[in-house]
Image (cartoon, rainbow, N blue to C red):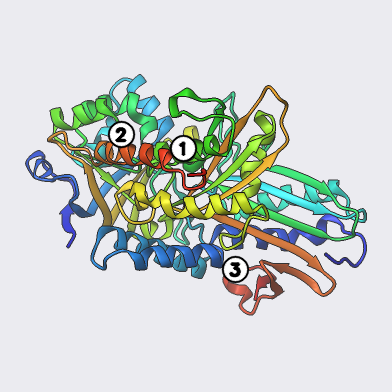
Amino acid sequence: MPRKLELPIDEARIRELRVGDEVELSGPLVTGRDAAHKYLVKAPHDATFDRMARGTVLYHCGPVVKRDPEGGWMFVAAGPTTSIREEPYQAEVIARYGIRGIIGKGGMGPKTLAALQQFGAVYLHAIGGLAVVLAQCVARVREVYKLEELGVPEAMWHIEVKDFPTVVTMDSEGGSLHAEMESASAAEARALMDRNPHLPK
Amino acid sequence: MLSTGSVVASELHTPLVELIRYTSSGLGKDVLAALARARDREDPGSRAHATFSLMLENVSRARAQSAPICQDTGTLIFYVDHGPEVSPFAVEEAIHEAVREATRRTYLRPNTVHSISGENIGDNIGPGSPYIHLHPTREPGLRIRLMMKGGGCENVGAQYSLPDARISAGRDLDGVRRCIIDAVHQAQGYGCAPGTVGVGVGGDRVTSYIESKEQLLRSLEDSNPDGQLDALEKELTESLNGLKIGPMGWGGKTTILGVKIGHRARVPASFFVSISYMCWAYRKGELVRTADGWRIDGASLTPASAPASSGFPLRVA
């Protein structure tokens, strides 16, 4: 059964999570992807982003959005994007803005894993391509930051989610499902290369 | 392919927008069947089983709402087979207009970025985008196939130049097989596994990749006309599951849905093997003009029964 977690969340509760835990998130979080990360490490401390991000999670997502009849925004399609592109920036963003979790897909590298340990955060894997189911977990769009400058997919969307499904694949103890899968499948890949049934015996 | 005279851009507009909506918001029967089989192979209650169930649920919700199944609506690649009565300029113009309209209707995300300025172009029409392959045919008729290829899976594609000592791949089918296994291992779950692997053998660097993408237009359920390649495709489709990478790389009994291999002649000095990885959200659609109207993936386009919901005059029946 998935664990239900309310956002924002404190360090102690995040440090209880382990690789393999299924987690459903509810509460406010913020999206940010390539352009946002590049901006966040280059710019001086950004108070708006701090207010949206501190103590909650950062979602690697570039949504498809629609205007609702009241003039607000609605998420139409909003699955995770590949996280590894943010590897050069992520540790610093976690450190500067007190982020407790990253939602994305594909996992991240050693620099981020070290930051998760040092600052107390986890990597939460969402299902890539699950755009409609995940958009329907977005209960409300609070605000959008730097929309004009960065465009719809790259803007920072401050949203409230309800029962957003993820799996912990990197934890604050240095565990990484991605590293385990990579080495487990490497041996089988090599064996399969050498086991070619189409070659004459 | 049949035709009833010349084709102008305005006539193409509605069927093309509908092709984009239909392709963006669902998967073909072959892919759905493969995902359902993958789910049924997993133990109920397992993470892999739950993941496949959510994937299928996502597709049915997307279809019901005409929403994109994935927010990355991908590189738009159009393959146009056109008879002598069809102006390729009219087709190109109509595709551009349909892409703009589909973007306004949120069937597509504003997904096209100027590579030098970094600006989002907004309406998905930019230098070289969408990519339109025009193939003239001697017979009259018009067929337009659309593939929407997400960036995550495009990024895990790979090109090998054989021989490749790292994986002991020589210039033969055993070498090709080693490249495919290596590429699937390298891709892990990053390309939204379980994917389908399109393979281009030979050609030059460009045509080798073109071949690998065109292989992805085949049905998961077809057979390769070359018996040797067919045996290799079927063997790898099963045996690559032994890597146990599973859906999204979280572990499971299905790592890929299919392997499709094509080849092009090469010069003696070159031997390329190109791999295009297609994510589980394997979006492709086919629009054909027939004597009695337009068809998408074999189904007729008919006047929409509830135009208020979509505001659009034609729908796939």
Question: Which residue is farthest left?
Answer: A12
Is residue B260 shown left or right of residue B211? left
Q: State the CA–CA distance, disc 1 to disc 3.
A: 41 Å
Crowd class of label 3 (few under 14; some 14 to 19; many from 20; radius 10 Å): few
Question: Which residue is farthest front?
Answer: A201
Read off the chain for label 2.
A
| Coordinates of residue A7 in the picture (x, y in percent) | 19, 49
Residue pointed to by mark 1: B183
| Coordinates of residue B82 in the picture (x, y in percent) | 84, 53
**Residue at screen point 63% across, 57% down:** B20
**Residue at screen point 69% across, 35% down:** B207
Is residue B228 shown left or right of residue A49? right
Question: Which residue is farthest bottom?
Answer: B305
In this rendering, do the residues under marks 3 and 2 share a single chain? no
Q: Amino acid at mark 1?
A: Ala
In this rendering, do the residues under marks 1 and 2 share a single chain? no
Secondary structure under the numbered disc 3 in the rendered image? helix
Viewer-nearest residue: A181 or A68: A181
Residue pointed to by mark 3: B310
| Coordinates of residue B246 in the picture (x, y in percent) | 35, 52
Circles 1 and 2: CB distance less than 8 Å? no
Q: Nearer the viewer, mark 1 or mark 2?
A: 1
Residue pointed to by mark 2: A108
Image height of B161 relative to B235, above or below? above
Is residue B201 shown left or right of residue B133? left
Secondary structure under the numbered disc 2 in the rendered image? loop
Circles 3 and 2: CB distance less than 8 Å? no
Secondary structure under the numbered disc 1 in the rendered image? helix
N-term-proximal mark, 1 vs 3: 1
